[in-house]
Amino acid sequence: MNNVLDHSIFKAYDIRGVVDQGLTAETVINIGKAIGTYALSLKQQQITVGFDGRLSSPKLCEYLIQGLTSTGINVINIGLSTSPILYFSTYELKTNSGVMITGSHNPPAYNGFKIVVDQKALSADEIQHLKEIILEKKFTRGQGKVSEQNVIDAYKRKILSSVKLKRKMKIAIDCGNGAAGIVAESLFRSLGAHIYPIFCEVDGTFPNHHPDPSRPENLKDLAKVLQDTDAEIGIAFDGDGDRLGVVTKDGEIIYPDRQLMLFAENILKTDPESNIIFDVKSSRHLFAWIKKNKGNPVIWKTGHSFIKNKMREMNSPLAGEMSGHTFFNDRWFGFDDGVYAGARLLEILSYEENANQKLKALPKDISTPEINIAVNEGQQHQIISQLQQSHHFPQAQEVIMIDGLRVEYPFGFGLVRASNTTPVLVLRFEATSEEYLKIIQEEFIENLTGKVEASKINFQ
């Protein structure tokens, strides 16, 4: 190879980096070769490819397809797409495998690849295996064919065939100039909703705000539309359409763990005793809520591919992450889909006279947003390993170590985990009062003291 492979682009859930730095033309071609080689080893004969609205995505698609077809695998290019539409295409076109070119919610200079092979989202070891194929140049050789197909209409028809609103609703939609703009407006109108759309034109420069609905500052424009119109609820999507943000009429953000409560309550009515999965960053109220609604709460690792694979293992009809990924496996296919989650949310709320009241009644405590502490590259995993071997939380009821340390108290929880994508420690806290929140945070400060620079852990 003429260029040196940047090992840091191979993340826990996907491949991601800065275009023309980590993601050079040669690297992307070789990523295509590695994916094709791996897919063919699992008897996959064809693969779908889609790309988001970033300015770099069409060119990366060309490089990727060049690499894929050089292995002999056939490619179906579905063009501009959301990640969920790409996942849908693997079922609709019966390829079972697909690659989505997307930078998701990252800054415009970034891009990357989300990969499904034989209906399994690649993560961790499989992604590292792709890197090894590239380093060892163990590429299968052949000459695959390329065809093109649009699956957007089929995607909409599939949703409309099962999701029905009981009453007409007026809603505000913010696509953040991301790829969801190709489908959201028309789908929700077809469902019977009156739409107040903002930023639904796909624009890879993201001129209005960053396409990340997990950040409150990115939902201010949506809240303003709700304030100025008769829309009863606002929904927002990230750059590749796999995450959902929700805002009430009076401007309260309904974070994804509370959205999951609503979805769980609905699904457990017809599918009781089911496993409902949520990640370690989610509210502790999910345990009691799911049990109250006759379900089995399961806490699991953060990361869309980890959650998807756990769903398959446990045959779960529903899972969710605090980041906004929600996975339906009852009337859908088990992949994360912000637009579909939005449709299911409207379906549930259409049975309520007052959507605002229903959403605000979901239980909540005082909680912090995600807190990031920057450390040196790789140090986040070392610190977590040290804490798992030796920690002291005297007031805790339980310490859960499936992904970092989630410490449960009678009055709340605290979490510290290692990010799998950037060199940071991720923390989150929830408690019944500000006083209890401070008690939890103080115990975490004591455990982190000496492991992290003191000025970085004063997060109260």
Image (cartoon, grey):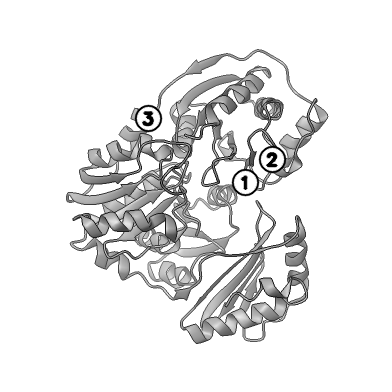
Name the residue: 22% across, 54% down. 231
Residue 102 lies, in percent from the top left, at 54, 37
The disc, 2 or 3, on the residue closer to the chain's N-terminal end is: 2
The 10 Å Cα crowd at callout 1, few under 14, some 14 to 19, many 20 or more, is many
Q: Determine the secondary structure under disc 2.
A: helix
Q: Which amino acid type is shown beneath numbered disc 3?
A: Ile
In the image, which disc is placed on residue 13? 1
Observer-nearest of 384 and 89: 384
Observer-nearest of 427 and 398: 427
Name the residue: 67% across, 71% down. 456
Q: Which amino acid type is shown beneath numbered disc 2?
A: Ile
In the image, which disc is placed on residue 152? 3
Dot 3 and dot 1 residues touching (CB under 8 Å): no
User: Disc 2 to disc 3, how far (Cα)?
Assistant: 28 Å
Residue 164 lies, in percent from the top left, at 24, 45
The disc, 2 or 1, on the residue closer to the chain's N-terminal end is: 1
